[in-house]
Amino acid sequence: DAGSKSGRGALVILEGLDWSGKSSQCARLLSYLEGQGCRAEGWRFPDRGTSVGQMISAYLANESQLDDRTIHLLFSANRWEKRALMESKLLGGTTLIVDRYSYSGVAFSAAKGLDIQWCKAPDVGLIAPDLVIYLDVQPEKAAERGGYGGERYEKIEFQKRVADHYHSLRDSTWKVVDGSLPMETVEEQLRELATNCIQKCQEKPLTNLTW
Ligand code: 2DT
Ligand code: MG
């Protein structure tokens, strides 16, 4: 009965390359948790619904050009504009299942050659995740999935560099799940990881991201 007591909600992030299966798994995990009576919401970054998010969306669709540092800061601003709502949801007992967060921010910008410390700095002070699940899929496998190649970063060579940067960001909150396993197997592993995390962090205070 994850989340049925009156503690805070958990901040659970899913990370991975484009077409690693994050969005499908987020949706499946969310409906499972809701079915268990757990209060949970699905979020994603970039949140394309805000005015900052619309600038990001146009950039990703190659409808606009932006300097690499400018777009990096817009991605970060897009998380900052959601920080207060995120905090109140979590403190109010709602678990957030979030498709991408600051790790995407750093891994994708660093893959363009930007300095990693520079990339990390604007996200210091955002809410620290309780759990980061990395869906590990080979860039070549992800590229075979339908729809691949539609947006700016969906090129195998670039995704390989992103994967290397993700690798260097792994810390104690990360769990790596083999995203090439059957969907149901991946789903089962995510259920277990998320349920454990939700139970464990009910009494823990929220902390800020420090890297
Ligand atoms: P989606 O396909 O998941 O909508 O992502 N990205 C994402 C960044 O470069 N920096 C960030 O901070 C975030 C959150 C990853 C769209 C693309 O945007 C990239 C893929
Ligand atoms: Mg995408």
Image (cartoon, rainbow, N blue to C red):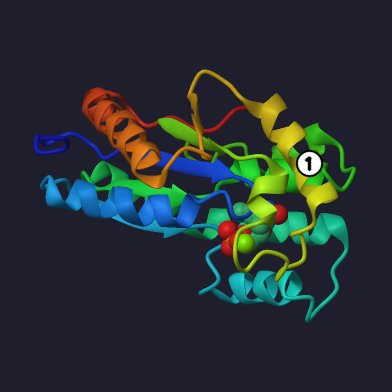
Whether residue 57 sits left or right of residue 84 in the image: it is right
Indicate whether 201 appears above or below 111.
Answer: above
Q: Nearer the viewer, residue 127 or 165?
A: 165
Residue 159: x and y in percent read 76, 47
Label 1 neighbourhood size at 10 Å, few (<14), some (14-19), many (20+)?
some
Is label 1 in a helix, a strand or a loop? Answer: helix
Say which residue appears at 34% left-offset and 43% top-offset.
184
How far across and how far down the image is residue 25, in percent? 40, 50
Q: Mark 1 and ligand 1: say if the CB distance to the nearest ligand atom is below 8 Å.
A: no
Residue 102: which quarter of the image? top right
Q: Quadrant of the N terminus?
A: top left
The residue labelled by disc 1 is: 160
The residue sitting at the bottom extreme is 63
- Look at the image and tell me in which quarter the C terminus lies: top right
Q: Decide which of 90, 137 is in the foreground and name it.
A: 137
Q: Position of residue 116 (x, y in %)?
A: 80, 34
198 lies left or right of 130: left
Q: Residue 75: where, in percent of width, then height?
A: 66, 57
Q: Quadrant of residue 5?
A: top left
Towards the viewer: 108 or 49: 108
Q: Is residue 81 left or right of residue 30?
A: right
Q: Looking at the image, which residue is at 25% across and 51% down?
A: 40
Q: Look at the image and tell me whether residue 85 can be seen.
A: no
Image mark count: 1
Picture residue at 87% right of the left edge, 48% below the top: 112
The residue located at (78%, 41%) in the rendering is 160
Residue 179 position (above or below residue 78): above
* Residue 16 visible here: yes
Picture quadrant of ligand 2: bottom right
Callout 1 amino acid: Lys
| Camera-nearest residue between 159 and 63 | 159
- Is 31 positioned to the left or the right of 49 in the image? left
